[in-house]
Image: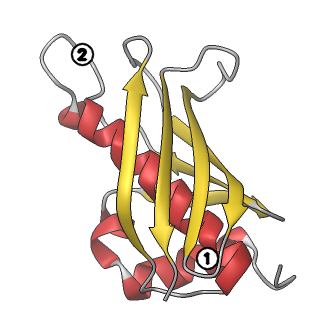
Amino acid sequence: MDRSLIPDLVNEFIAESFPSAHRESLRCIDIGDGFAVARWTYDDSELRPGGYISGPRLFGVADMAFWISTFTVDGLEPMTVTPGMSIRCLRPARHGNVIARADIDSVGRRRIVATVRVWIEGDEDRLVAVAQGTYARP
């Protein structure tokens, strides 16, 4: 892994290369060998009826963590794309920042596979979703 990859550098790169994700308060909060952690800052104006954080929001945070994790393999590469990703929602997500940690399971010549755990900040042992996906390498 490129030792210069730190959350501030990654967030700067995201702001420049994917400004809509940056505007949606998606941030890298940790990155290391074969993993990355992303956070969506809670905003009650974006909740579904009943005060729930939506499935698409959970998926977006999971996908962001996965994309950031690919930087540990290929560097800051904007063109890595998701050919497939699935998510399983385990319980309702409410009242807090959403955290997603992507751990790379395998790296091939053309593909990177990872598993992503998603929870509400401060409650890491109570997952709200689990995702697995494949990214195509540039």
Tell me: 34 left or right of 97.
Answer: right
The residue that appears at 54% across and 55% down in the rendered structure is 65
The image quadrant that residue 90 belongs to is top left
Q: Position of residue 55 (x, y in %)?
A: 28, 31
Q: Which residue lies furthest to the left in this view?
A: 49
Q: Is residue 63 visible?
A: yes
The image quadrant that residue 57 belongs to is top left
The kind of residue tagged 2 is Gly
The residue that appears at 55% across and 79% down in the rendered structure is 110
The one nearer the camera, 106 or 91, is 106
What's the CA distance linking mark 1 and mark 2? 31 Å
> Where the N terminus falls, by quadrant?
bottom right
Query: Eyeballing the image, is 58 above or below 34?
Result: above
State how many labels appear: 2
The kind of residue tagged 1 is Val
Is there CB contact under 8 Å for labels 1 and 2?
Answer: no
Q: What element carries label 2?
A: loop
Query: Eyeballing the image, is 22 above or below 26?
Result: below
Q: Position of residue 83 (x, y in %)?
A: 35, 64
Query: Badge 1 is on which residue?
Result: 10
Query: Badge 2 is on which residue?
Result: 51
Where residue 29 is drawn, which disc sits there? none
Q: Position of residue 120 (x, y in %)?
A: 54, 25
Tell me: 84 left or right of 119.
Answer: left
Tell me: 45 left or right of 7.
Answer: left
